[in-house]
Amino acid sequence: PLLAHYWSPQPQLGLGQALRGKATSAMDISDGLLADCGHIALASKVAIEVERERLPLSQSLVDFLGHADAQVAALSGGDDYVLAFTLPSVELPLLLADGWPIHVIGRVVTGQGVTLLDADGKDITPQTRGYQHFRESP
């Protein structure tokens, strides 16, 4: 299932349509969750806090990599093509009632950038956050 998901990603077109008029931002996770949340934060002039313990991890990924490496892969691995989005909290129950598989993993706050928080609320943001298109070569 892991390789099939990687080689044949299933874009969430239906969810994207359901978010129309509800989400305040959305993009597919192609550069890594933290990197793409950073893109959303920058474009929206806000900060995004991601709670590591709320990350949805597939059991097959955990079995293959172990829990810690599965978290790293979920945070910084790309080519996932699921949607990361922000929306007013009032919209969430409506989308869940319609059966959309939504995972709340963080919040939008005042500030800038993206921060990864551990279970105690401590900033554990790694240096590498995903693929960087315009990174200078070493």
Image (cartoon, rainbow, N blue to C red):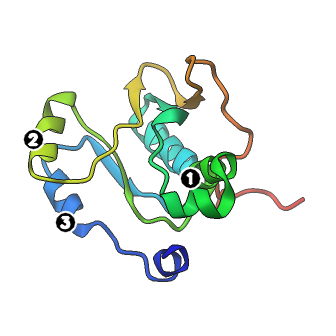
Marks 1 and 3: in contact by CB < 8 Å? no
Decide if residue 39 is on the left or right side of residue 133. Answer: left
Numbered badge on residue 12: none
Q: Which element type, helix, strand or loop, lies under badge 3?
A: helix
Q: Position of residue 113 (x, y in %)?
A: 55, 32
Q: Position of residue 51 (x, y in %)?
A: 50, 31
Q: Which residue is mark 1?
A: 74
For marks 1 and 2, the one nearer the N-term is: 1
Tell me: residue 57, above or below residue 112: below
Determine the residue positioned at 18% across, 51% down: 19
Kindly identify which residue carries mark 2. Answer: 94
Up/down of 91 relative to 101, above or below: above
User: Marks 3 and 1, how far apart in space?
Assistant: 22 Å
The foreground one among 20 and 50 is 50
- Distance from disc 1 to disc 2, alpha carbons, whole Å, reads 26 Å
Q: Amino acid at mark 2?
A: Leu
Q: Residues within 10 Å of mark 2 (few under 14, many from 20)?
A: few
**Circle 1: residue type:** Ala
- Amino acid type shown at disc 3: Gly
26 above or below 63? above
